[in-house]
Amino acid sequence: MEKKEEYRASLPFFGIPRLIPYMKKYRKTLILMIICGLCGTGVDLALPLLQRYALNHYITGRTMDTLPFYVVLYVAIILFGAVVNYISTRNAWTTEVSVNRDLRSAAFDHLQKLSFSYFNQNAVGYIHSRVMSDTGRVGSLVSWTLMDSVWHLSYLVGSIAVMLAINARLALMVVLILPLIVVLFSLFQRKLIRANREIRELNSKITGDFNEGITGAKTIKTLVIEEKMGRDFLSDTAGMKRKGIHVARLRGLFALTMNLASSLALAIVLWKGGYIAENEVGTFSLFMSYAQGMM
């Protein structure tokens, strides 16, 4: 049996314009999620600054004059961060399940309008798997991925701005690592995206094999093609195993590379920032926290 040639559509701007109608319904939830995410970034940026003040003022300065006010402020910021993180997380979860529901409803309605020839050419299990898994990925994209992107980008910009304001020379040394990380991230991300797409494709084929084996059991036994169906199933699962191992290795190598880059940034802070530690231990701690957080 000849395998049909796969067709992959290329959508402009990664298909984001197609998602806008589904996101418009939840724009208030998305805006609140983004605002709370930015507030959470502000908390993450403020805590190292408070720690810097505590080390420089209380440890180096050997004074406890503002300790009650400092404790109240520190606890208030932590509680504020917990509240905004809870709101942003809840809104992301709400957006994810709502967009998933709308996409699956639209897909179901579209499937009812397709011709019989489409279902003759595509296994029901394959269609079901793609509808469920692909809509789940899209729902995660417009919720958790969007929130993470806002948090990471704002933290990166904010931490660089604070470090430049405190010590521009040391900040530039840390920032020099970022282009290397961007290049490495781009290389791994392209491979991981391609491999994950192939895994979802194979998973859909396996689901289709299960569906054919169950719903077409009478036809399979009548035609005495159990062995052929078994070989096809084993071929698809073996491909899934190989691809899964390949993705796991890529992810491990990616994590190792990112950890190496993070350690390199911390090494620069330790190497060139040692002169700060003598008089400003808090500043030294702040740069280490920001460098590790940026990576």
Image: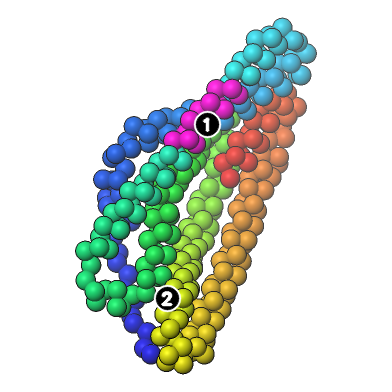
Judging from the image, what secondary structure is the residue with disc 2 in?
helix
Identify the residue at the far bottom of this view: 224
Reading the image, the residue beneath label 2 is 215
Choose the circle earlier in sequence order: 2 or 1. 1
Reply yes or no: does residue 142 show up in magenta.
Answer: no
Residue type indicated by callout 2? Thr
Tell me what residue is drawn at x 40 percent, y 41 percent: 95
Residue type indicated by callout 1? Tyr
User: Are the residues flagged by discs 2 and 1 in contact, CB closer than 8 Å?
Assistant: no
Nearest the eye: 138 or 295 = 138
**Residue 18 x, y percent position in the rendering:** 27, 52
| Label 2 crowd bin: few (<14), some (14–19), many (20+), radius 10 Å | few
> Can residue 256 be seen from the camera position used here?
yes
- From the image, state whether disc 2 or disc 1 is nearer to you: 2
Reading the image, the residue beneath label 1 is 86
**Residue 114 x, y percent position in the rendering:** 23, 67
- The quadrant the N terminus occupies is bottom left
Tell me what residue is drawn at x 72 percent, y 7 percent: 65
Distance between mark 2 and mark 1 Cα atoms:
45 Å
Judging from the image, what secondary structure is the residue with disc 1 in?
helix
From the viewer's perspective, tell me whether residue 113 is left or right of residue 185. Answer: left
**Residue 59 x, y percent position in the rendering:** 76, 19
Q: Give, as a single range, the part of the protein colored magenta.
A: 78-91
Nearest the eye: 290 or 204 = 204
**Residue 162 x, y percent position in the rendering:** 53, 29
The image quarter in which residue 271 lies: top right
Reply yes or no: does residue 83 show up in magenta.
Answer: yes
Nearest the eye: 94 or 200 = 94
Tell me what residue is drawn at x 46 percent, y 76 percent: 214
> Can residue 264 be seen from the camera position used here?
no
